[in-house]
Image (cartoon, rainbow, N blue to C red):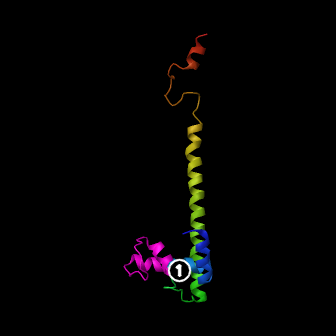
Amino acid sequence: MDRTKVMELADRVGGLFRLCVLLQKRVAELVAGSPKLVDTRETNPIRIAMLEVEADAIDLVDLSEEEIANLEAQSQMATDEAELLEALRSRMTRGMTLPAVDTGAGGGGYGAGGGGGAEDSDDDD
């Protein structure tokens, strides 16, 4: 579904946040085995839910202020968790690359005595 259609659906239900909540709840119902409310051969539950919104077959019951606050808090926690995981991944990646850059005295990881590299031939001169 294109962006224009999504925005039309969001306007129909009262905004993007409400559309997301409605789709999430309906997709969960479809995955749990609820029957489709529109006649379609579509098998993707997200697309089915969007078709149901488009056909006015489903609507979001107004949420209480507490439910809205809980959903927004969950959304913020997910965002915070994603940022934390990215920071940890970045730190771990940096930690992994530092030893690889610091190879010591040109040994190239082949152990003491080298491997007959340029350092050895310079010593003979």
Relative to the observer, which residue lies in front, 35 or 104? 35
The answer to whether residue 106 is left or right of residue 48 is right
Q: Position of residue 108 (x, y in %)?
A: 54, 29
Farthest left residue?
33
Relative to the observer, which residue lies in front, 118 or 83? 83
Quadrant of the image containing the N terminus: bottom right
The answer to whether residue 82 is left or right of residue 26 is right
Relative to the observer, which residue lies in front, 23 or 80? 23
Farthest top residue?
125
Which residue is pictured at 47% across the width and 80% down the height?
A: 26
Question: Of helix, strand and loop, which one carries label 1?
Answer: helix
Task: Examine the image and state in which quarter residue 117 appears.
Answer: top right
Q: Is residue 84 above or below residue 39?
A: above
Q: Position of residue 75 (x, y in %)?
A: 58, 73
8 falls in the magenta region: no
Q: Amino acid at mark 1?
A: Glu
36 falls in the magenta region: yes
Q: Which residue is mark 1?
A: 54
**Tally of numbered tags:** 1
Q: Which residues are magenta?
A: 25-54
Which residue is pictured at 43% across the width and 81% down the height?
A: 38
